[in-house]
Image (cartoon, grey):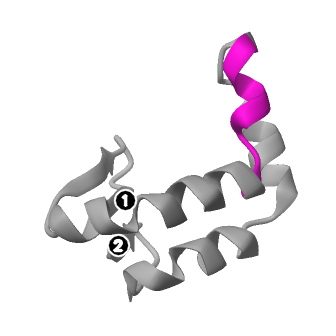
Amino acid sequence: MKVKIRTSDIRISMPIPIRMIGFVVKLIPDIVFDDIKHYIPEPYNVLATKDVISVLLNECIDILKENKGLEMLHVEAVDGTFISIRL
């Protein structure tokens, strides 16, 4: 998996082995998941936790390996900020 972040000030490109995805999710602060819950509809917002996301990703490792090269996230903002997550 490759994560690319590009702004006017910085350029970051991080390769992340698929097996480490669960570990990387555990490094994300809890406040990020709390913020995400506000944008998810009511019956599903309880699923936006570190533990649930980590379990889902660990269960889907085989599927992620089969779809190598798939771009999961592609965001380009007006100010030039660019974020890409590719398997």
Residue located at (68% from left, 22% from top): 44
Residue 68 sits inside the magenta stretch:
no
Q: Position of residue 42 (x, y in %)?
A: 74, 12
Q: Residue furthest top?
A: 42
Q: Which residue is mark 2?
A: 4
Which numbered circle lies on residue 63? none
Q: Which residue is mark 1?
A: 83
Circle count? 2
Q: Residues within 10 Å of mark 1 (few under 14, many from 20)?
A: some
Q: Position of residue 62 (x, y in %)?
A: 31, 67
**What separation in Å lies between label 1 and label 2 (alpha carbons)?**
6 Å
Give the residue type at disc 2.
Answer: Lys
Horizontal side of 55 relative to 50 (left or right) equals left
The magenta region covers 43-50
Q: Position of residue 43 (x, y in %)?
A: 72, 13
Q: Position of residue 61 (x, y in %)?
A: 39, 68
Classify 41 as above or below 78.
Answer: above
Q: Main secondary structure of the magenta part?
A: helix
Q: Residues within 10 Å of mark 2 (few under 14, many from 20)?
A: some
Classify 40 as above or below 58.
Answer: above
Looking at marks 1 and 2 on the same chain, the residue that comes earlier in the sequence is marked by 2
Quadrant of the image containing the N terminus? bottom left
Element carrying mark 2: strand
Quadrant of the image containing the C terminus? bottom left
Residue located at (83% from left, 41% from top): 34
Element carrying mark 1: strand
**Is residue 38 visible to us here?**
no
Residue located at (55% from left, 53% from top): 56
**Is residue 3 visible to us here?**
yes
Give the residue type at disc 1.
Answer: Ile
**Does the residue at mark 1 contact the one at mark 2 (Cβ under 8 Å)?**
yes
Residue located at (81% from left, 64% from top): 29
